Each structure stands twice: as structure tokens, then as C-alpha cells.
């Protein structure tokens, strides 16, 4: 239920004497009803327009059933996940015992973004200040732009599956971070065993330490597990090789 008429994407007036009982026990008339779109993937229907309400009310039961999503309540906020894809589709922040849903419908802004050839968010804010009000650049997401930034396609799935641990180790280096951790590390390297899916993470001050970290990791495998790494799979990064 809501008291705000302009939130409705479709609307139909209610004829007759339809009323609902609100929190103080009084009966309030229903002026109309229909649908409200609160995000790209969530449309609430039916929603009652009750002008005497002091705030909007959302039924979790109706939301989870009709939008095929799950709800997880936390002390500071709650999140909604799509049951099919597992993606987070919305969230609500806790304030004074109530959870306030984030209504983030970027459909109109996204439409202009596509029409104009996918310009930056700063350019859209300059052209459409009313559509970009109360929005930050990281809140606006375009799937086409994200895919266009990828340097290469994802690797195809391999049919080869090792049956013994440490037969195949995947490794990758990440960095550098703009903000170092407490020990002034800006890089990290991972080693993942393809069979057991165990993962080792090492923090580095710079990527020149990669070769020595790998040698220590290889020695640890030999000492603790009495075996050797047969295949090391990387992205062909030169930091794994000793250039001296």
C-alpha cells in the first residue's frame, strides 16, 4: 500500500466503498490500485493507493511469491535475491526498527543511455539532472558496457578433470590495489587445486615477489603432501619466471 500516486506505472481508480484498516485501527478509503515498478526486475501488483497512509507498506509474502525471490534480514539491512539466478535484485536499509526499500528504477535513464550510444554516467548527469538525482556512478550499471570493457572472452570449459590433488594448479595475480592493507600489501596471488578446490592466498608488497612466493608454495606442497605440482595453469604472466 502507498499514499503516493505518482509511483504507479499503471493505475485504475477504485469504485465503491473499498476501505482498509490501518495501524491505528481506523478505516481508510482506497482511491485506486495497480502496479508499481521498484526495480528492473521487480514489479509490485496489485498495490493499493491509500491517501491517508503516512508511509508505504510492503508485504514480504506477496513480494517473495509473485517476484520469485528470497529475503534475508540482517541487523543493518535486508537483501532480496532472485531464486533462479541467485543475483541480488534489491535491498532495504534498517532505520529505527523499520526496513526502507531502495526504489531504484533506472529504466528511463538506461533507455537514454542506449539511445545516445552508451555515454558515461557523468555525461548523462549533465544532460538529464532530474533522472540522475540521488544516484552515484557506481549505482548505474549497463551490462553492454561491462561486456565491452572485457579484453578477451572467457575461457571454454575444459573436459580434462584431474583425479588426484596437485595434478593441476590454477594461479593468478591481482593488483595493485589503490589502498594497501595494514601491512602495506597491495597485491595478492592465488593457487587453486583443480581437484580438491582448495585455495591458497598470499599477500605481496609488489609483483616482483611472485617467483619466490611460488617456489615457497611448491616447497610446501612437497614437504607437507609428499607430492609435486604437475601442471601450473596461469594467464601466461611473465611474473612467474625468474628473469635473472
Image (cartoon, rainbow, N blue to C red):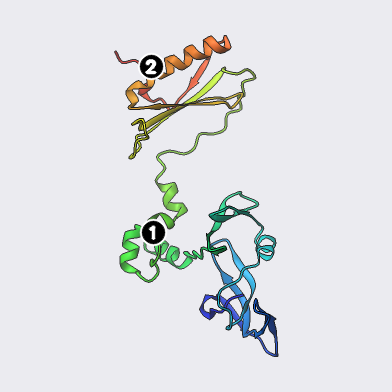
Residue 157 point in image, percent of width and height? 57, 32
Element marked by disc 2: helix
Q: Where is the C terminus found, in terms of image quarters?
A: top left
What distance separates the C-alpha of mark 2 from that of mark 1?
A: 42 Å
User: Label 2 crowding class (10 Å Cα cut-off): few <14, some 14-19, many 20+?
Assistant: few
In the picture, the quarter occupied by the N terminus is bottom right
Furthest-bottom residue in this view: 16
Labelled pair 2, 1 in contact (Cβ < 8 Å): no
The residue under the point 58% across, 83% down is 52
Residue 71: percent from left, percent from top: 63, 55
Q: Which residue position holds label 2?
A: 212
Q: Which labelled disc corresponds to residue 136?
A: 1
- The answer to which of 226 and 155 lies nearer the viewer is 226
- Write the residue at 31% across / 15% down: 243
Residue 136 in which image quadrant = bottom left
Label 1 sits on a secondary structure element that is loop
Residue at 42% x, 42% y is 150
Amino acid at each position: 500500500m502507498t499514499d503516493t500516486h505518482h509511483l504507479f506505472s499503471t493505475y485504475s481508480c477504485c469504485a465503491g466503498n473499498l476501505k482498509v484498516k490501518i495501524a491505528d485501527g481506523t478505516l481508510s478509503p482506497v482511491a485506486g490500485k495497480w502496479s508499481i515498478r521498484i526495480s528492473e526486475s521487480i514489479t509490485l501488483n496489485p498495490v493499493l493507493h491509500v491517501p491517508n497512509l503516512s508511509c508505504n507498506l510492503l508485504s514480504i509474502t506477496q513480494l517473495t511469491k509473485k517476484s520469485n525471490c528470497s529475503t534475508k534480514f540482517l541487523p543493518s539491512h535486508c537483501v532480496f535475491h532472485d531464486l533462479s539466478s541467485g543475483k541480488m535484485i534489491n535491498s532495504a536499509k534498517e532505520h529505527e526498527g523499520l526496513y526502507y526499500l531502495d526504489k531504484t528504477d533506472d529504466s528511463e535513464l538506461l533507455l537514454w543511455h542506449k539511445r545516445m550510444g552508451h555515454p558515461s554516467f557523468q555525461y548523462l548527469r549533465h544532460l538529464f539532472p532530474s533522472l540522475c538525482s540521488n544516484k552515484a556512478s557506481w549505482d548505474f550499471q549497463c551490462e553492454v558496457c561491462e561486456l565491452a570493457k572485457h579484453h578477451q572472452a572467457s575461457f571454454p570449459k575444459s573436459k580434462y578433470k584431474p583425479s588426484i590433488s596437485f595434478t593441476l594448479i590454477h594461479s593468478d595475480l591481482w593488483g595493485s590495489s589503490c589502498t594497501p592493507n595494514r601491512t602495506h600489501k597491495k597485491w595478492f596471488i592465488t593457487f587453486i587445486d583443480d581437484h580438491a578446490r582448495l585455495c591458497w592466498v598470499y599477500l605481496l608488497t609488489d609483483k616482483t615477489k611472485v617467483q619466490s612466493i611460488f617456489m615457497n608454495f611448491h616447497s610446501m606442497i612437497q614437504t607437507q603432501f609428499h607430492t609435486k605440482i604437475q601442471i601450473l595453469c596461469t594467464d601466461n604472466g611473465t611474473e612467474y619466471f625468474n628473469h635473472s
